[in-house]
Amino acid sequence: MIIVTSNRGKYREYKEIIGKHFNLKLMLMRYPEEQLDTIEKVAERSVYYLSGTINDDFFIDDSGLFIEALRGFPGVYSSYVNKTLGNEGILRLMEGTSNRKAEFRTCIAYYDGKLNLFTGKARGTISDAARGENGFGFDPIFIPVGQELTYAEMTLEKKNSLSHRYRAGKAFLKFLTKKAI
Ligand code: IMP
């Protein structure tokens, strides 16, 4: 089983979620991500692009942060916004905003000759300041519902017990386990 990603942070998480049960190999590479209106469509398009070049089963992960007060922004633009505005830019956009609700979404797109999609969501809030050193991307500004710590203040095990990626991974794992029987 191959994971195709340029993000070592995602790989680190999947090593625990999937790699404990299936032999997981990292193919560290970038691939084109078209700007479509849902992460599922983005993931689907990327898989079809990659399926022509990889001769094995593989999956990718397309994720995004959807902030309610910003009408779902950055959503499918999360990668670009993370690189350009960064966490400080998001916090500035949210200054004076009392509705801090947000949702992280992950879509796993697995290709085994056919396309299979698995999604996971985690609701939460945007913190007032960036906190924590762990993880990657928007982890320092996202507090999952029912928690006080941001993802970046949590251990990998803790994030992996409640994250959007964990939830998508759980559905994927169930599928893989059924397939292996
Ligand atoms: P991608 O398009 O799936 O690679 O991710 C979109 C953006 O969201 C990138 O900037 C990632 O760093 C960020 N991102 C994806 N997953 C997470 C996560 O679990 N925590 C924090 N940021 C994430």
Image (spheres, grey):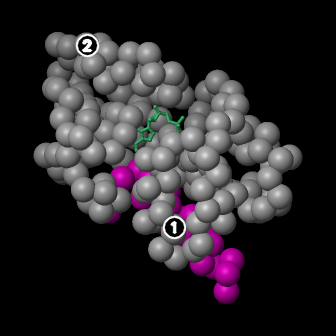
- In the rendered image, residue 58 lying in the magenta stretch gets the answer no
Q: Which circle marks residue 18 in the picture?
A: 1
Identify residue type, mark 1. Answer: Ile
Residue depicted at x 60% and y 56%: 26
Q: Is residue 54 above or below residue 1?
A: above
Q: Is residue 122 above or below residue 112?
A: above
Residue 36 quadrant: top right
Can you give x and y, in whole percent of width and height, for residue 20 in the image? 47, 74
Taking 112 as reference, is 88 left or right? left
Taking 11 as reference, is 96 left or right? left
Q: Main secondary structure of the magenta part?
A: helix
Q: Residue furthest left?
A: 148
Residue depicted at x 17% and y 21%: 98
Q: Is residue 170 above or below residue 63?
A: below
Residue 103 visible somewhere in the drawing: no
Can you give x and y, in whole percent of width and height, for residue 99 in the image? 22, 25
Marks 2 and 1, Cα distance to the nearest angstrom? 36 Å
Ligand 1: give its quadrant.
top left
Residue depicted at x 24% and y 40%: 133
Q: Quadrant of the C terminus?
A: bottom right
Can you give x and y, in whole percent of width and height, for residue 156 in the image? 31, 57
Residue 13 quadrant: bottom left
* The one of 70 and 81 positioned closer to us in this rendering: 81
Residue 72 quadrant: top left
Q: Nearer the viewer, mark 2 or mark 1?
A: 1
Could you say whether the residue bearing mark 2 is in a helix, strand or loop?
Answer: helix
The range drawn in magenta is 161-181
Q: Which circle marks residue 28 in the picture?
A: none
Residue pointed to by mark 2: 92
